[in-house]
C-alpha cells in the first residue's frame, strides 16, 4: 500500500504495541478531564482512581466503572461538562430512554477530531476531491447529517447537504449535479430505487459509484442486493452520538468489517450479563471510551450494541481492528427509519394525555422499503364525551406530541377500552412485523 | 331536549352485537340507531327508551359511552317541511354537526334528530316556528 491510500498513514498503520501506548497516554489524559466533571469525580474516587497517575497500564481501564445511558440522563443537561461553557461550540443530543435526551457538548478541538476521523473514513473508501457527495441523512441534533458533512468537506468532496426526504428532488439533484457518493440509510436506499422507477430518471443518467450506509442494521445479503440493483459499492458505517456520531468505525475499500479508529476509541467487548471482557471473534456488547473528548468525557460507555471484533488483520494494512455488523441490542431500543426510539419515550408521551386509557401498543410495519410506526391507544371510558370532534382532536394531539418528542411521524389508531391484548406481567407493547433487511 | 347514547367501538365484526346483547339483557328498546365508520373505530349512536339506564349498563361493562343532548323534532310528512326547518337554521346561522331523519307514518309524521352546538338557542327558534320538540318517551305516543 502506498501512503496515498491512507489519510494519516502513521496513525492508521501504527503497530499494535505503539497504538496501545498511544491509547494509554490518551486514556490518562481523558481521566484527568473526567475528574473535572460533577459526575465522574466522586465515581472515580470511589473506584480508587484519584488522578491519571492511578492508570498505569491499559488494563487499568477495567477499574473504571461503566457509564450508562441512564447516567447520561441523570447528568442532563450539563453534569458531564468538563470545560467552561464558553469553550463549547456545539451541542448534539440523542434519544434517551425517557423524554430526557442524552447531551454531548463539543469544543472546537472535539469537532476537529471528529471531522478528521470522518475524513479518514471517507478516504479509506477511496473517495476524495473528485467526488460529488449527496448527504441524505437528517441534519440537526441527529449526528448523522452534520458528522459526515464536515468530514466530506475536509477531504475536498463537493458536498450537497440535502438531508432526508423529498425523494424525487433527491433524484433530480443526483442527476443534475452528477452525484457520485451517497450517505443514506439502507431502507431509504431501497426506497429511492422504487421512486426512481416511477420518476422516469434512468440509472444510466446518474453518476453514482458508492453509498455509505448506516444508522440501522441490515444484512450482508441486503448489501449485495443494493450493490447489484444500484451497481455501486456499499460501505458500512457505525457511530453513535455519545461517541461523536458517524466516523467511529467505517469500512475501507476491502468492504469486510468496519475499522474502529483505535487511536481515538478504546473498545471492550463484554458479556452483558457477567460484564467480563471477551476475546476478539466473540460477540458481546460494545463498551466505548472516547480517548480524545474534551467537553464531554465518556469512560467505558455501554453502547448496548452487540457485535464482535474480526480476529484477523485487514488486507488494507490498517492496524485498527475491524468490527462485525451490529447484530442486535441488549436493550429494547427500536430503530425506525434510522431514528433511535425507546418504547418508554412513546409511553411517556401518551400516558400524559388524560383521554388515553391504560393500554397501548406499538406496531412496526413495512410500507415498501420504509418503516411505519403505528401507535394503538385505548381511549379512556371516563373521559369520553361522545364527540367525534373530541376523538379527532385527541388523535391529532397524540400525533403532534409524539412527533415533537420522537421526531418521526406515527399513525395513531384509537381503540375502545379493553380491546388491546393484556399480557400477564410485563405487557407485550411492541409488535414488530418488519421483515429484516 | 332528548338524550342520545354515543358509543365508541372498534371497527371490527361483532362490536354492534356486543352492544345490542348488553342492551337486550337490560331490556332496553332501541328506537333509532346509526353507525359511523371512522377507519380504525366506529361511533354507534342510539336513541333508546331508557338512556340513563342504558348508559350506566354500558359504563359498568367498561365501554366508552356518553350521553349527548340532541333535539328531536316531529314534523308533518309533506313536501317543503325539511326546507322550512333548514331555512330557520340558515337564517339564524345555526350549524348542524349531525342529523338524521325518518318517516314514521307516510304522509303524516316524520322525525328529525339534530345534533348541534347551541341546543338551547335552536330549541327556542324551532319552537317559535311551530315545530314540536319531543323527548324520547314522546316518540311512543305519536
Image (cartoon, rainbow, N blue to C red):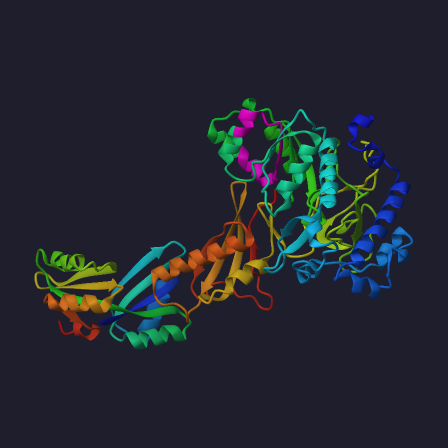
**Residue A63 percent across, percent down from the top left:** 85, 59
Tell me if A198 is positioned left or right of A30 in this view. left
Magenta highlight range: A173-193
Q: Indicate the quadrant where residue B34 lies.
A: bottom left
Q: Is residue A162 magenta?
A: no
**Residue A299 percent across, percent down from the top left:** 78, 54
Tell me if A83 is positioned left or right of A20 in this view. left
Look at 44% across and 68% down and name the residue there. A380
Q: Indicate the quadrant where residue A224 lies.
A: top right
Look at 51% across and 53% down and name the residue there. A403
Tell me if A311 is positioned left or right of A417 in this view. right
Q: Is residue A97 at least partly visible in the picture? A: yes
**Residue A172 percent across, percent down from the top left:** 51, 29
**Residue A339 percent across, percent down from the top left:** 59, 48
Observer-nearest residue: B67 or A59? A59
Look at 75% across and 54% down and name the residue there. A298
State whether residue A206 is above or below residue B23. Answer: above
Tell me if B114 is positioned left or right of A149 in this view. left
Q: Is residue A179 magenta?
A: yes
Look at 58% across and 59% down and name the residue there. A345
Amino acid at each position: 500500500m502506498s501512503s496515498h491510500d491512507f489519510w494519516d498513514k502513521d496513525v492508521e498503520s501504527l503497530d499494535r504495541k505503539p497504538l496501545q501506548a498511544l491509547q494509554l497516554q490518551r486514556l490518562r489524559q481523558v481521566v484527568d478531564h473526567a475528574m473535572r466533571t460533577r459526575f465522574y469525580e466522586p465515581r472515580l474516587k470511589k473506584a480508587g482512581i484519584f488522578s491519571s497517575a492511578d492508570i498505569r497500564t491499559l488494563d487499568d481501564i477495567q477499574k473504571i466503572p461503566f457509564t450508562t445511558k441512564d447516567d447520561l440522563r441523570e447528568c442532563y443537561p450539563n453534569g458531564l461538562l468538563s470545560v467552561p461553557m464558553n469553550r463549547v461550540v456545539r451541542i448534539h443530543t440523542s434519544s434517551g430512554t425517557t423524554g430526557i435526551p442524552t447531551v454531548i457538548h463539543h469544543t472546537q478541538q472535539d469537532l476537529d477530531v471528529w471531522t478528521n476521523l470522518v475524513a479518514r473514513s471517507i478516504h479509506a473508501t477511496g473517495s476524495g476531491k473528485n467526488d460529488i457527495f449527496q448527504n441524505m441523512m437528517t441534519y440537526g441534533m441527529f449526528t448523522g447529517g452534520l458528522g459526515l458533512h464536515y468530514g466530506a468537506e475536509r477531504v475536498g468532496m463537493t458536498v450537497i447537504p440535502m438531508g432526508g426526504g423529498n425523494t424525487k428532488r433527491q433524484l433530480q439533484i443526483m442527476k443534475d449535479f452528477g452525484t457520485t457518493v451517497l450517505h443514506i440509510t439502507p431502507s431509504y436506499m431501497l426506497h429511492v430505487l422504487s421512486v426512481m422507477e416511477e420518476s422516469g430518471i434512468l440509472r444510466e443518467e446518474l453518476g453514482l459509484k458508492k453509498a455509505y450506509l448506516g444508522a440501522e442494521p441490515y444484512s450482508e445479503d441486503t448489501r449485495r442486493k443494493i450493490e447489484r440493483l444500484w451497481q455501486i459499492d456499499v460501505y458500512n458505517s457505525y457511530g453513535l452520538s455519545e461517541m461523536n456520531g458517524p466516523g467511529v468505525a467505517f469500512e475501507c475499500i476491502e468492504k469486510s468489517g468496519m475499522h474502529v479508529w483505535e487511536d481515538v476509541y478504546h473498545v471492550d467487548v463484554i458479556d452483558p450479563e457477567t460484564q467480563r471482557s471477551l476475546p476478539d471473534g466473540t460477540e458481546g456488547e460494545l463498551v466505548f471510551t472516547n480517548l480524545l473528548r474534551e467537553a464531554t468525557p465518556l469512560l467505558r460507555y455501554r453502547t448496548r450494541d452487540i457485535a464482535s471484533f474480526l480476529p484477523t488483520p485487514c488486507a488494507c494494512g490498517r492496524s485498527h481492528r475491524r468490527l462485525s455488523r451490529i447484530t442486535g441490542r441488549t436493550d429494547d431500543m427500536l430503530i425506525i427509519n434510522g431514528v433511535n426510539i425507546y418504547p418508554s419515550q412513546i409511553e411517556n408521551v401518551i400516558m400524559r394525555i388524560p383521554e388515553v386509557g391504560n393500554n397501548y401498543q406499538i406496531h412496526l410495519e413495512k410500507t415498501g422499503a420504509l418503516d411505519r410506526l403505528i401507535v394503538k391507544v385505548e381511549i379512556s371510558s371516563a373521559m369520553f364525551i361522545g364527540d367525534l370532534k373530541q376523538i379527532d382532536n385527541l388523535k391529532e394531539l397524540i400525533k403532534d406530541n409524539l412527533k415533537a418528542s420522537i421526531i418521526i411521524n406515527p399513525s395513531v389508531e384509537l381503540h375502545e377500552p379493553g380491546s388491546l391484548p393484556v399480557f400477564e406481567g410485563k405487557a407485550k407493547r411492541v409488535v414488530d412485523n418488519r421483515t429484516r433487511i | 331536549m332528548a338524550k342520545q347514547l354515543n358509543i365508541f367501538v372498534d371497527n371490527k365484526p361483532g362490536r354492534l352485537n356486543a352492544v345490542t346483547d348488553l342492551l337486550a339483557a337490560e331490556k332496553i328498546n332501541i328506537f333509532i340507531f346509526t353507525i359511523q365508520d371512522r377507519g380504525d373505530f366506529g361511533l354507534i349512536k342510539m336513541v333508546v327508551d331508557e338512556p340513563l339506564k342504558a348508559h350506566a349498563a354500558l359504563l359498568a361493562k367498561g365501554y366508552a359511552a356518553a350521553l349527548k343532548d340532541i333535539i328531536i323534532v316531529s314534523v308533518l310528512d309533506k313536501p317543503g317541511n325539511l326546507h322550512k326547518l333548514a331555512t330557520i337554521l340558515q337564517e339564524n346561522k345555526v350549524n348542524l354537526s349531525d342529523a338524521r331523519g325518518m318517516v314514521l307514518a307516510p304522509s303524516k309524521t316524520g322525525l328529525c334528530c339534530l345534533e348541534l352546538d347551541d341546543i338551547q338557542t335552536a330549541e327556542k327558534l324551532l319552537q317559535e316556528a311551530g315545530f314540536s320538540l319531543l323527548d324520547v318517551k314522546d316518540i311512543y305516543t305519536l
